[in-house]
Amino acid sequence: RSIIGVAGAAEGSGATTLTLCLARLAARAGKSVALVDGDFTDPQLASRLGLAVDSGWEHVLSGAAPLADNVIHSRGDEVALLPLVAGGLRASEMIDSVHAPATARTLRQNYDLVLIDFGSIAGGGQTAIARKIAKQFRLEAALLATHRADGGLLPRVAQLAPELAEVMIGTVENQITIAAAG
């Protein structure tokens, strides 16, 4: 499976963190990895990696810039990033352009693994955006990040985002530990 989406069951459930961890593990295993920020409501991949970017995927989708000019390559490993600068609903409308499937084809051809961070799909606009990206990229697998084990999650995902549910390969339960100050 070369294109995998990572979605959060709720805000703060760890989809971005899980995406970054999977990229690191794949790179250590010798795979070339492309990270795609697909969270148009709250793009965070670039900032989480300590990068300040002024051009990103929305510029590729609009046709204003070529993909090659917007992919950031790491010098230390085989991980590349296609960031979002601002995202937003207006930018997400461009996912329906010819540039989204072309982006998917190019990434699939040049990287062993493409990981898309969908952010939270608990509702709102990001759910519809994730569905469009899954369709345009021909998503092959999806993981769902959650705070707790919940057997009722997959039926809810099937209702919200059937395109993700049909390729869902599992859930990852993130546990948060808060240390007391003292």
Image (spheres, grey):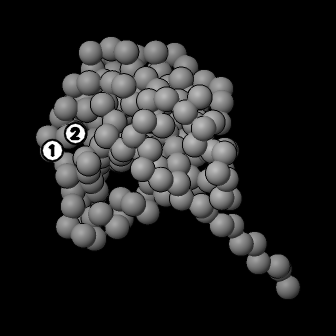
User: Few, some or many C-alpha atoms within 10 Å of disc 2 (few <14, some 14-19, many ≥20)?
Assistant: many
Q: Is residue 95 left or right of residue 148?
A: left
Determine the residue located farthest toward the left in the rendered image.
Answer: 109
Q: Are marks 2 and 1 in contact (CB under 8 Å)?
A: yes
The residue where tag 1 is placed is 110
Instruction: Please give the name of the residue rendered at 64% of the width and 51% of the height, measured from the top-left corner.
Output: 151
Instruction: Please give the name of the residue rendered at 46% of the width and 15% of the height, measured from the top-left corner.
Output: 93
The x and y percentages for residue 36 are 37, 41
The residue where tag 2 is placed is 107
Image quadrant of residue 5?
top left
Nearest to the observer: residue 159 or residue 90: 159
Q: Is residue 29 above or below residue 149?
A: below
Q: Is residue 99 above or below residue 22?
A: above
Using the numbered discs, state the Cα–Cα distance from disc 2 to disc 1 in whole angstroms. Answer: 5 Å
The x and y percentages for residue 136 are 33, 24
- Residue 21 in sight from this viewpoint: yes
Instruction: Please give the name of the residue rendered at 47% of the width and 21% of the height, measured from the top-left corner.
Output: 92
The x and y percentages for residue 141 are 36, 44
User: Few, some or many C-alpha atoms within 10 Å of disc 1 (few <14, some 14-19, many ≥20)?
Assistant: few
| Quadrant containing the C terminus in the rendered view | bottom right
- Count of numbered tags: 2
- Residue 126 in sight from this viewpoint: no
The x and y percentages for residue 113 are 26, 51
Nearest to the observer: residue 85 or residue 132: 132
Q: Is residue 135 above or below residue 72?
A: above
Determine the residue located farthest toward the right in the rendered image.
Answer: 182
Nearest to the observer: residue 65 or residue 77: 77
Q: Secondary structure at mark 1?
A: helix
Q: Secondary structure at mark 2?
A: helix
Q: Amino acid at mark 2?
A: Leu
Q: Amino acid at mark 1?
A: Asn
Q: Is residue 135 left or right of residue 159?
A: left
